[in-house]
Image: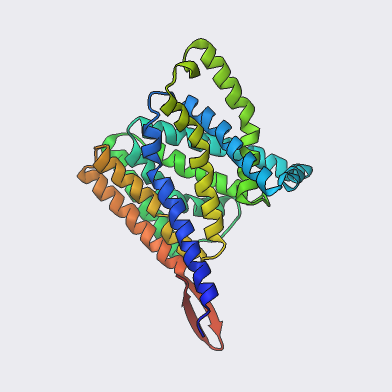
């Protein structure tokens, strides 16, 4: 018998997850509106306003007690400090990339991120590769090598984004906290640095908040909302849908960013890019499809379940 309640929850989960990855994919439009401000200035505001936004939510939910309790564990504290520095670096690279007309390369970073995560799992957690993961990583490496040889430089923006986000995911494994609590503490740790930066550089005239128009100030304040909201949507959605479905949906984000970079911002996307991305897209497809199959012994037979 069809369980309508379960079906309804999964539908909501897909909507939340699609909303999160769509928002992340469209973020270049938001950051482009702030391209008159330095990436560091945007980052400092993003950290401060993200903390303000989630602090309000925590107060409304009366969850500050649970939040502060995480500081009782030294491992958790160290993991929070590590994750906050890593995600801050990731944010800075992404904002700089978008406002320096490297949206296409930034999208490449989030295509290869799952494969970097697999490599970290091998190197740090001593996980084992299956043959499809080996093929995926090899194809992605070929795609990156093509770009490197053709343009004479390593696509460091893409690799930096992929590596920092994979490291962030690894650090988060050590923290037993929900999305709201996690981002509250991570931004809280970085708030002093953000305040010091804004105070120092405003005094030097590099960013004068008194001369910023109302629309720009509203966008800076809104950076906290556009940062935290997709994370909360993702956390809500990931609770109710299979992980394999999340794996499929996550590629909505770099795909939207890639389309924005090529068609809206008119960034270069030559035949070399097509050739290179084809290897990476194939790697992503093989990797994702291989994750859908779960081998389950059924007596003497082997049963394959596809979770979508």
User: Is residue 203 left or right of 29 when viewed as pictured?
Assistant: right
Total numbered labels placed on residues in the image: 0
Q: Residue furthest left?
A: 271
What residue lies at 27% left-to-right and 37% top-to-bottom?
265
Q: Between 211 and 281, which is closer to the camera in this rendering?
A: 211
Where 162 sits versus 125, above or below?
Answer: above
Q: Is residue 130 visible?
A: no
What residue lies at 74% left-to-right and 45% top-to-bottom?
70
User: Is residue 270 left or right of 183 when viewed as pictured?
Assistant: left
Q: x, y percentage for residue 83?
A: 61, 41
Q: x, y percentage for residue 108?
A: 37, 45
Q: Residue furthest bottom?
A: 300
Image quadrant in which you'd find residue 191: top right
What residue lies at 58% left-to-right and 26% top-to-bottom?
194
Q: Between 173 and 180, which is closer to the camera in this rendering?
A: 180
Q: x, y percentage for residue 237?
A: 52, 59
Q: Between 299 and 15, which is closer to the camera in this rendering?
A: 15
Q: x, y percentage for residue 80?
A: 66, 41
Q: Is residue 10 visible?
A: yes
What residue lies at 45% left-to-right and 70% top-to-bottom?
308
Q: Residue furthest right?
A: 72
Where 203 sits versus 118, above or below?
Answer: above
Where 39 sits versus 142, above or below?
Answer: above
Q: Residue furthest top?
A: 204
């Amino acid at each position: 018998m069809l369980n309508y309640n379960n079906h309804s929850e999964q539908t909501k989960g897909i909507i939340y997850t699609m909303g999160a990855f769509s928002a992340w994919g469209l973020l270049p439009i938001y950051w482009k509106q702030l391209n008159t401000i330095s990436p560091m200035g945007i980052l400092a505001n993003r950290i401060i306003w993200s903390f303000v936004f989630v602090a309000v939510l925590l107060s409304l939910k009366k969850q500050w007690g649970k939040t502060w309790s995480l500081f009782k564990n030294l491992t958790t504290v160290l993991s929070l400090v590590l994750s906050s520095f890593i995600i801050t670096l990731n944010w800075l690279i992404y904002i700089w990339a978008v406002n320096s007309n490297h949206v296409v390369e930034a999208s490449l970073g989030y295509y290869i991120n799952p494969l970097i995560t697999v490599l970290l799992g091998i190197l740090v957690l001593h996980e084992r590769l299956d043959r499809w993961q080996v093929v995926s990583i090899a194809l992605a490496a070929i795609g990156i090598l093509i770009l490197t040889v053709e343009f004479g430089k390593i696509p460091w923006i893409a690799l930096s984004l992929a590596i920092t986000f994979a490291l962030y995911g690894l650090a988060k494994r050590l923290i037993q906290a929900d999305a709201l609590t996690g981002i509250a503490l991570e931004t809280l740790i970085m708030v002093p640095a953000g305040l010091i930066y804004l105070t120092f550089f405003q005094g030097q005239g590099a960013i004068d908040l008194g001369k910023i128009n109302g629309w720009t100030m509203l966008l800076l304040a809104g950076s906290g909302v556009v940062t935290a909201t997709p994370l909360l949507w993702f956390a809500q959605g990931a609770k109710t849908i299979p992980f394999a479905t999340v794996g499929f949906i996550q590629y909505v984000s770099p795909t939207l960013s890639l389309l924005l970079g090529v068609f809206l911002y008119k960034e270069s996307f030559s035949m070399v890019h097509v050739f290179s991305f084809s290897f990476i897209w194939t790697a992503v497809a093989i990797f994702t499809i291989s994750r859908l199959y779960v081998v389950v012994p059924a007596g003497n037979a082997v049963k394959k379940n596809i979770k979508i």
